[in-house]
């Protein structure tokens, strides 16, 4: 049998892979598009996995990003449950070899391989009842485990860990969050938002242990987790343990193919890799930092996957990519909604606006507003997102004046 | 099964069968109705599924709550009195025939 061929082969069936396929069709591309995903499901939304899917508010059907009929109509050929082991690249394209030794030839390749959960390097991490969350299959296991009751210990006070903790707590479980750093969300936001989160989650009854290193997961004699041992000797009882200590870009295929990778696959703003026939998008990539020249930045978000996939699709067709929008992110944690506009990494100062139930942190670099983190403050989020896009700023000296709204201050400018 | 009619910014209209319990946004996006971006997938976080509810239907859909209202304040297309984020409109049998006009900029 002749080797199958795709004009464009997309490796990865997530949001970024689907985004490239969708955008190619929107731009009028009429060639064949094959998307190969490791999971047995059509592209689905991941954000609800740590929230509504665990609580039962969203089901499998609501996760689905596109109806199967739509994908058929668009001529997007989706291969499910297919793991690409390696790709061979040539000047004209190349071929991808699956782990069952079958292969497919392509003219152009899209790597949208995502990221995998970072493992916890302690004894006991393999015990039953210890989970990490990347896929809907992981989420289904966690949902069932949580239904059986707690106590739940979440290792890692980042977004996914806190979302799961808040969801489980709202369902009445006993929940402890163990964070190695001195504050929550340390890598992504300034201290005032960390403190706001800490107070909110503690008020909801979540036990949060900061500066707490996990040294061991303790199991029963049948191999199920029963506790989490901390460096100070404390043993936290646990029926379920979630490890939420970050994600690692899936660069294996790219590395083997000789593409430049650092932490992630290195791409330019147009999604180009170091091979002219290969683009990449989403959580597997690192891209130029928006305001720190020469540095690379990995952005794990739906917005980033969507925007990079649009750029990559344009590049595949020899078109200039559209201007990049302001990166943004959200996290629902129980009744609290965090929204982030812009990239605060690289800021040289921030101004806090805090009221009873809400907080806004405005980040500056060289007198210019570059980003904002808000909790429960959608009006400020929307205003700052727009202002950063339009390169408008607020006077840093007056930015903390709570008698004036952020929108007012933006109108006035610096 | 209720149907919803979406009027897209490109002038096309789409009559779509909607699953009860799904959102109007989800209904449109799954079948590729043009004009709704819906980047956050329905989490009330991005304001990119902005629609204008036909005035005859606003009583049935209801108006935006406080949070949605704040999101709409800086939506790309200026809001109107019948603006909603379509991710917040839950499909019920009572909404059979609902007409929504998709905001031109999301």
Image: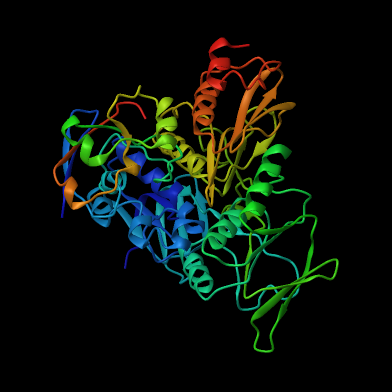
The correct choice, above or below, for B69 with respect to A129 in the image is above
Residue in the foreground of this view, choosing between A123 and A258: A123
Q: State the quadrant of the C terminus of chain A.
A: top right
Q: Is residue A335 left or right of residue A59?
A: right
Q: Is residue A214 left or right of residue A32?
A: right
The correct choice, above or below, for A317 with respect to B87 in the image is above
Q: What residue is rendered at 46% in x and 72% in y?
A: A100
Residue A107 appears at what percent x and percent y? 40, 47
Q: What residue is rendered at 54% in x and 42% in y?
A: A275
Residue in the foreground of this view, choosing between A264 and A291: A291
Residue in the foreground of this view, choosing between B94 and A286: B94
Give the quadrant of residue A119. Answer: bottom right
Applied colour scheme: rainbow
Q: State the quadrant of the N terminus of chain A.
A: bottom left
Residue A184 appears at what percent x and percent y? 70, 49
Residue A244 appears at what percent x and percent y? 64, 59
Q: What residue is rendered at 68% in x and 34% in y?
A: A345
Can the viewer see residue A249 in this picture?
no
Can the viewer see residue A29 in this picture?
yes
Count of marks placed on residues: 0
The correct choice, above or below, for A357 with respect to A39 in the image is above
Residue A233 appears at what percent x and percent y? 84, 71
Q: What residue is rendered at 36% in x and 39% in y?
A: A23
């Amino acid at each position: 049998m002749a080797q199958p061929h795709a004009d464009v082969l997309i490796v990865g069936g997530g949001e970024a892979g689907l985004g490239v396929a969708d955008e190619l069709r929107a731009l009028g591309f009429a060639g064949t598009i094959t998307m190969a995903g490791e999971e047995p499901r059509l592209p689905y939304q991941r954000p609800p996995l740590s929230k509504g899917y665990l609580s039962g508010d969203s089901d499998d059907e609501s996760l689905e990003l596109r109806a199967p009929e739509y994908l058929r109509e668009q001529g997007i050929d989706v291969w499910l449950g297919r793991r690409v082991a390696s790709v061979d690249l040539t000047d004209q394209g190349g071929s991808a070899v699956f782990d069952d030794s079958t292969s497919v030839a392509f003219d152009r390749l899209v790597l949208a391989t995502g990221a995998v959960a970072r493992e916890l390097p302690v004894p006991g991490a393999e015990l039953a009842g210890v989970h990490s969350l990347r896929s809907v299959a992981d989420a289904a296991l966690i949902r069932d485990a949580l239904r059986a009751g707690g106590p739940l210990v979440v290792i890692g006070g980042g977004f996914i860990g806190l979302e799961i903790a808040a969801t489980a707590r709202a369902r009445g479980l006993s929940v402890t969050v163990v964070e190695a750093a001195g504050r929550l969300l340390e890598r992504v936001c300034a201290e005032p938002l960390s403190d706001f989160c800490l107070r909110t989650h503690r008020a909801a009854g979540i036990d949060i242990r900061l500066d707490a290193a996990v040294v061991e997961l303790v199991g029963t004699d049948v191999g199920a987790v029963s506790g989490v041992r901390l460096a100070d000797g404390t043993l936290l009882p646990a029926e379920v343990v979630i490890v939420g200590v970050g994600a690692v870009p899936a660069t294996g295929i790219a590395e083997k193919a000789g593409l430049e990778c650092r932490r992630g696959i290195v791409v330019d703003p147009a999604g180009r890799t170091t091979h002219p026939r290969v683009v990449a998008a989403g959580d597997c990539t690192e891209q130029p930092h928006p305001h720190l020249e020469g540095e690379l930045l990995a952005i794990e978000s739906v917005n980033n996957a969507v925007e990079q996939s649009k750029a990559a699709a344009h590049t595949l067709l020899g078109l200039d990519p559209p201007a990049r929008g302001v990166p943004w992110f959200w996290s629902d944690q129980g009744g609290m909604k965090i929204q982030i506009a812009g990239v605060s990494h690289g800021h040289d100062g921030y101004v806090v606006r805090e009221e009873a139930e809400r907080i806004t942190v405005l980040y500056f670099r060289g007198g210019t507003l570059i980003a904002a983190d808000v909790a429960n403050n959608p009006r400020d989020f929307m205003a700052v997102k727009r202002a950063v896009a339009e390169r408008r700023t607020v006077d840093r000296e007056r930015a903390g004046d709570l008698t004036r709204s952020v929108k007012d201050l933006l109108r006035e400018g610096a | 099964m209720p149907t919803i009619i979406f009027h897209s910014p490109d002038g096309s209209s789409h009559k779509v069968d909607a699953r009860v319990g799904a959102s109007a946004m989800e209904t449109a996006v799954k079948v590729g109705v043009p004009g709704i971006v819906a980047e956050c997938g329905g989490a009330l976080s991005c304001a990119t599924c902005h629609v204008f509810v036909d005035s005859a239907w606003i009583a049935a859909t209801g108006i935006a709550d406080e949070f949605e209202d704040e999101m709409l304040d800086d939506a790309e297309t200026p809001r109107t009195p019948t603006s909603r984020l379509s991710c917040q409109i839950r499909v019920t049998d009572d909404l059979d025939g609902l007409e929504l006009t998709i905001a031109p900029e999301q």
